[in-house]
Structure formats: C-alpha cells, structure tokens
Image: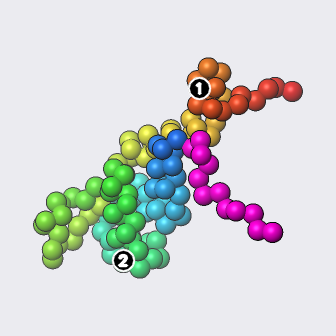
Amino acid sequence: MAVPRLTRPPTLPDDVAEVIGVLGSAARLEIIRHLDLTGPTSVAELVERVEATRPAIQKHLTELQRAGVVVPDLPEDRWHGRKVLWRLEPERVGQMAEVLRTYALPVSSGRTELEIGAAGDVPHQPH
C-alpha cells in the first residue's frame, strides 16, 4: 500500500512555504552563492558557473527576482541586445534565512512557549 506524499504540512506558514519554494533549489542556491562571491554577473557567466542551460538560469533568476533576492542592473524594457548584470540583495537572503531559522528552530531562536503554542507547535521537554 502506497503512502500518500505530503507536499505541504497543513500548519506550514505561508512565509515559510514561500522561502522553501524560492531557496529550496540547489541551482538557485548556487546562483545566490556565486553572486555573493563574485558580485554582479551576466546570464552567460551563470550558465557556465552553475552548469545549467540558459533557459533554466533565466527561469531561476525570474523566480529569485520575484522574491526580491536578485535585481538586474537595467530595467527589463532595456534588455534587448544588452548584457544584463544580476546583483544579489543579501539583506533579503538574510531575511529569508531568518524565516527558516525561526520556524525550524523555535526554541533555539528565542521564541517563548506562548509564541510557539500560538503557532500550533509543541515545545520540547528537556529530558
């Protein structure tokens, strides 16, 4: 008998689900890492570095841009025939990482038992 696959726990907050959707890709994390290490980078350079196709890189950049993680150096209406450089927004990545940390480590992140209970979590009891 097959066990149904749980794709999203019913108590998973929307902001956590969004972060997982954006950062839950190895390719996207590699793009973020590369931009942090090297600074503004073109799609062509990312294709080479991440070893992905141009359409795949563009799809990942679109998703990262939608989430505010990366920004292009030119407005989209000026892209035609120009080399667009993509820049990382490290503050946004930090905010997203904090959302994950707070959700995954409620006690270690300093949430009170009242806050944890209000979120529907069960605090652990020390042994």
- The amino acid sitting under disc 1 is Ala
Task: Spot the residue most to the front.
Answer: 1
User: Which residue is at a point 15% across and 76% down the rendered structure image?
Assistant: 81
Q: Is residue 41 left or right of residue 73?
A: right
Residue that label 2 marks: 55
Sequence-first tag of 2 and 1: 2
Task: Spot the residue most to the bottom.
Answer: 53
Quarter of the image where one finds residue 48: bottom left
Quarter of the image where one finds residue 118: top right
Using the image, tell me which numbered label, if any, was put on residue 107: none
Q: Is residue 97 in sight in this rendering?
A: no
Above or below, comparing residue 106 to residue 45 in the picture: above
Q: What are the residue bounds of the magenta stretch?
A: 1-12
Above or below, comparing residue 53 to residue 110 in the picture: below
Task: Specify whether residue 3 is painted magenta.
Answer: yes
User: Which residue is at a point 41% across and 79% down the rendered structure image?
Assistant: 53
Residue that label 1 marks: 118
Above or below, comparing residue 11 to residue 55 in the picture: above
* Count of marks overlaid on the render: 2
Quadrant where the N terminus lies? bottom right
Whole-number angstrom distance, CA of label 2 to CA of label 1: 43 Å
* Mark whose residue sits in front, 2 or 1: 1
Q: Is residue 114 left or right of residue 16?
A: right
Using the image as rendered, state which of residue 53 and residue 106 is in the foreground.
106
Where's residue 61, x and y in %? 35, 64
Where's residue 20, x and y in %? 52, 52
Where's residue 102, x and y in %? 56, 35
